[in-house]
């Protein structure tokens, strides 16, 4: 298969040859293959194999392009050969479309720019410190020193759920990260002066306190979060469960919340008070 493909390539290029041969170019005239020597000229087509500095490039690059163009490759390469761009530390990588690709998955002037923006969610834009001030993704130095600069606390055995995030206590990444939590997350364990972040359950909370506290919120739209929507408690969810049980037993025939019975007021629908009390205590466990 590969031999036939090569023959077809040579025939289509009009060279008249049926094969190529690999030779070594003795760049320094030493008579040996050593530093600086590389592939030379194919004696069958009289074209350079690599041809990095030759107009028209090398025949091996043309052959690769022929394969990617004619055998179903969705992202073909350009003809000829060129030196690969060096990856220089602290510089962005060379875009694929300028490194020998005829067609790329994500060009930098379109999809690539959009995908590149995903590395920064923009959540830090509303904080006191921008993300690129915290970590430079083109340099390894800031990433290596980022976490060691954060001062931690000793292990706590008291059940404390909040942390001291005063400026003298935290490093550069922690303060802005806490601001992001406060702006976009339901829970934030930070304590800054008189400002107390929201936690799931404060120390000393009873099960009843947890059930009565807002643990979620009503969201009515897909893909859009409304942080000002009404809160939802576990007690409310338990009442929904109780209402479903009443309806399944035939004790409540309401078809919407405005006409349904309150499951915590079962005597109002004619149930024996003792049975009603057992029912409420069961679904509220």
Image: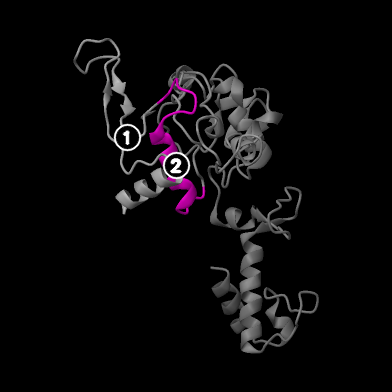
Place of residue 138 in the rendered image (x, y in percent of width and height, measured from the top left): 51, 22
Q: Residue at x 35, y 47 (%)?
A: 7
Which of the labelled discs sits on residue 199, or is there none? none
Q: 244 or 115: nearer the eye? A: 115
The residue to which callout 1 is attached is 44
Compared with residue 199, is residue 57 higher up or lower down, i.e. above or below? above
Residue drawn at 53 percent across, 24 percent down: 92
Q: Is residue 208 magenta?
A: no
Image coordinates of residue 132 in percent, x first then y, are 60, 23
- Dot 1: element: loop
Q: Is residue 133 left or right of residue 19?
A: right
Per the rendered image, the range of residues in magenta is: 51-74
Pick whichever of labels 1 and 2 is earlier in the sequence: 2
The count of marks equals: 2
Q: Provide the residue designation for mark 2.
A: 14
Is residue 66 a member of the stretch shown in magenta?
A: yes
């Amino acid at each position: 298969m590969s031999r036939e493909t090569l023959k077809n390539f040579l025939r289509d290029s009009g060279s008249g040859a049926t094969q190529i041969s690999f030779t070594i170019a003795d760049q320094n005239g030493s008579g040996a293959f050593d530093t600086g020597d590389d592939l030379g000229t194919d004696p069958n087509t009289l074209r350079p194999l690599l041809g990095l500095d030759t107009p028209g490039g090398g025949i091996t690059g043309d052959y690769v392009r022929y394969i990617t163009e004619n055998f179903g490759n969705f992202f073909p390469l350009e003809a000829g050969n060129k030196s690969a761009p060096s990856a220089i530390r602290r510089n962005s990588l060379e875009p694929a479309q300028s490194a020998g690709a005829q067609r790329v998955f994500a060009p930098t002037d379109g999809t690539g720019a959009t995908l590149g923006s995903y590395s920064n969610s923009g959540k830090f834009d509303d904080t006191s410190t921008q993300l690129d001030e915290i970590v430079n993704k083109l340099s390894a130095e800031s990433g290596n020193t980022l976490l060691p600069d954060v001062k931690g606390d000793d292990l706590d055995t008291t059940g404390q759920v909040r942390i001291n995030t005063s400026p003298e206590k935290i490093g550069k990444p922690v303060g802005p990260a806490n601001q992001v939590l406060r702006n976009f997350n339901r829970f934030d364990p930070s304590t800054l002066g008189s400002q107390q972040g929201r936690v799931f359950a404060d120390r000393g909370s009873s099960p009843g306190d947890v059930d009565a506290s807002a643990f979620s919120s009503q969201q009515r739209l897909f893909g859009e979060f409304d942080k000002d929507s009404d809160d939802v408690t576990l007690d409310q969810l338990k009442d929904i469960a109780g209402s479903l049980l009443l309806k399944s037993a035939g004790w409540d025939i309401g078809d919407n919340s405005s006409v349904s019975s309150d499951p915590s007021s079962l005597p109002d629908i004619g149930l024996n008070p003792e049975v009603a009390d057992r029912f409420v205590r069961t679904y509220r466990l």
